[in-house]
Structures are given as C-alpha cells and as structure tokens.
Image (cartoon, rainbow, N blue to C red):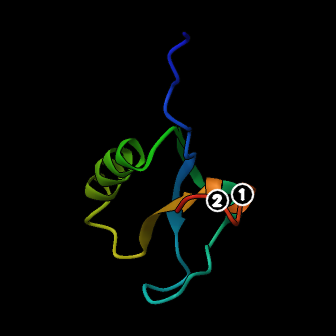
Amino acid sequence: MAEHAPKQLLHLVFGGELTEPGSMAFKDLAKLDIVGIYPNYQAALKAWRGKAQSSVDNAQMRYFVVHIHRLMEPDGPH
C-alpha cells in the first residue's frame, strides 16, 4: 500500500513598503518582495518571521502570509 503524503496547503509570503503604516496599499508594486510559496503554514510562518524581523526598523515595511489553498479550494480545509 502506498504511503499518503500530507495534503499541501500552499501559503505565499510576500511584503513591501506601505504608503503609510496603517494602510494596506504598497508604495511601489514593482518592488514587492516575493519571499516564496510554502507547503504548509508552519514553514510560511517561519519565513514570515525572518523577513518581518529583518525589517523591524522600517515602520512602513510589512510582510504577509496568504493562504493560497483557500483561494484554490474555498470549500476545502482551513
């Protein structure tokens, strides 16, 4: 019997400089930092933490984790 790999729950980590700290609008979309796509939330969170901590001195820099699997399968596991 074949082993079953855990289902991939893809997550995207990206960030960039916002127009102002409370905003969700980026200053320059061409300068977004696409950190990567990860197979689970734990791996994405680790990448997010590293990038967020490296930019802590810039109040306008923000990184986000996007749950791609929720966009691909809206009725699937969350």
Q: Camera-side residue: 45 or 23?
A: 45
Circle 2 SS class: loop
Check contact, mark 2 vs mark 1: CB within 8 A: yes
Disc on res. 73: 1
Specify the amino acid type for callout 2. Gly
The answer to which image quadrant residue 8 occupies is top right
Q: Give the image location of residue 56, x and y in percent.
A: 26, 64
Identified at 62% across, 80% down, the residue is: 25
Specify the amino acid type for callout 1. Glu
Q: Is residue 56 left or right of residue 69?
A: left
Identified at 52% across, 62% down, the residue is: 78
Circle 1 SS class: loop
Q: Give the image location of residue 40, x and y in percent.
A: 46, 43
Q: Quadrant of the N terminus?
A: top right
Q: Which residue is the extreme one toward the top? A: 1
Q: Give the image location of residue 46, x and y in percent.
A: 31, 46
Identify residue for label 2: 76
Q: Give the image location of residue 38, x and y in percent.
A: 51, 40
Q: Is residue 27 left or right of residue 51?
A: right
**In the picture shown, does residue 29 fall above or below 13?**
below
Q: Camera-side residue: 32 or 73?
A: 73
Q: How crowded is the residue under tag 1: few (<14 C-alpha within 10 Å), some, or many (20+)?
A: few
Q: Which residue is the extreme one toward the front? A: 1
The answer to which image quadrant residue 52 occupies is bottom left
**In the picture shown, does residue 19 fall above or below 48?**
below
Q: How crowded is the residue under tag 2: few (<14 C-alpha within 10 Å), some, or many (20+)?
A: few
